[in-house]
Each structure stands twice: as C-alpha cells, then as structure tokens.
Amino acid sequence: MLKKSMVLTSAVAAILSSGSVLADASVNAAASNNYLWRGVTQSNDTASVSGGIDWSGESGLYLGVWTGSLVFGTETDFYAGYAGKAGDVGYDVGVITYQYSQAPDVNFTEAYVNVSFSDLTLGVASTIDSAAGNLDDKFDEGDLYVSASYGFKAGAFDASVFAGSYMFENDDLLGGNADYSHYGVSLTSGEVTVALEKNDIDDPAGDAADDNVRIVATWSKSWDI
C-alpha cells in the first residue's frame, strides 16, 4: 500500500531498533496499482507513484517529506517527530501536514502518537489545523483516527493484520454517516507488498464501490544517501 504510515515507519525504524544511531538520511520510491489511505482510494482505483526523503538523528528526532500522485494532481506531506524506546516500549510522537496541489482549500495538519510493544503497534492521530475548505466538513479540527497493527512471520513472508477507525468531528453535520472503519492484511517479500483491505463506508449517494474489497500491490525501495 502506498501509505504514509509506511514512510513514517521507515523514517524511525533505525531509531527504534537501536539505542543510539548516527544521523542518517535516505530517499524512497514506490509504485502501486492503487493508493489507499486509511482504507480509501486516493487515486480512483488507478495506479500511483510516490517518493520521499527522510532524515533521522541519534537523538530520536526525524524529519521528512513525501509526495504521491492522486486522481487530481499530487499530495505532498511534510512531517517531523521524535521516536525512541522506554524499556520494551517504542514510541513515536510527531506532526504531519497534508498539502494538495489542486485543492489547497482542503489541506490539513495532524498530531500523532504511536506506541509499539513487541509486534503490536497502536496509534492515534488528531487533526489540529485545517484549511477553510474543511470548515464544517471532513478533515476539520477535532477529527480523530485510531489504528492498530500486528506483524508476524508467515513462512517466507512478513505479514501484518491491521485496522483503523476514523471519527469525524462534523459527523452529525455530514448526515451522521461520515465515520467509518477499515481493516486488512498484508504480505511482504523483499520490495513487494500485497494487501487485501476493506472499509465499511456508508455512502448516502449509493456509490457501492466505496466499500469494495481491494487488492493492492506495491513495490517500494529506499536508499541511504
């Protein structure tokens, strides 16, 4: 999946796997048959490409930028955070802003916290700022997204099961049917990930395609610089 969670994970992996690491920088690239974000296609079920640059320091601080193709223009995300470990518990706290080239009136910014123990990761993100186009609409201040994932080995594959729930501050104003959940499973071998994912979106317009089961294949790679 072309998910920003994958980008953020690569940005902090070195920090969480070691008590002390030198400053490091990397670039990443990916291509997918579909760009899903929190269970919803951002590319109208068509192919998408993306790339980014990440920097992480020995203190736990990290910075990055990611950009990906959408059905309309591009999305560019800037993020910064701090990651580390307290005993056996890993943590990642940061801020990310989502910028859309063709629709700047719906840009928004989130603060997030992720906590991991062994192979389980729990996360929460809250919208802390939004552009005028989101006023009394989706992605307004106060939106909350919670997620969980569990990784394990499945033979020769790295596997993961995951789920998330999006709770919108303006759900009542949007007819009481904006909130939704999604869930799925993924298998990774080398540079290729194949995921199966579904959401429970209730679209009042009757677009049943919104909640179709989707199979997403992604190639991704990163290089140290």
Image: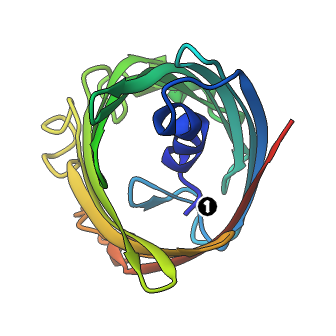
**Secondary structure found at label 1:** loop
What percent of the width, then of the height, locates residue 46? 65, 71
Please give the name of the residue rendered at 59% of the width and 57% of the height, measured from the top-left corner: 2
Vertical comparison of 193 with 93: above or below = below
Vertical comparison of 41 with 117: above or below = below
Q: How is the image coloured?
A: rainbow
Q: Quadrant of residue 196?
A: bottom left
Image quadrant for the C terminus? top right
Please give the name of the residue rendered at 34% of the width and 36% of the height, measured from the top-left corner: 138
Question: Disc 1 designates what residue?
Answer: 43
What percent of the width, then of the height, locates residue 85? 36, 27
For label 1, count other residues whose C-alpha is less than 10 Å away and answer few (under 14), some (14-19) or many (20+).
Answer: many
Is residue 112 in view from this perspective? no
What percent of the width, then of the height, locates residue 211? 33, 72
Q: Nearer the viewer, residue 122 or 142?
A: 122
How many numbered discs, if any? 1
Q: Is residue 90 left or right of residue 175?
A: right
Q: Is residue 81 left or right of residue 197?
A: right
Q: Amino acid at mark 1?
A: Ser
Q: Residue furthest right?
A: 225
Q: Nearer the viewer, residue 124 or 202?
A: 124
Please give the name of the residue rendered at 53% of the width and 52% of the height, measured from the top-left corner: 3
Q: Is residue 170 left or right of residue 17?
A: left
Vertical comparison of 31 with 123: above or below = below
Please give the name of the residue rendered at 52% of the width and 43% of the height, measured from the top-left corner: 9
Image quadrant for the N terminus? bottom right
Vertical comparison of 221 with 223: above or below = below
Is residue 91 in view from this perspective? yes
What percent of the width, then of the height, locates residue 220? 70, 61
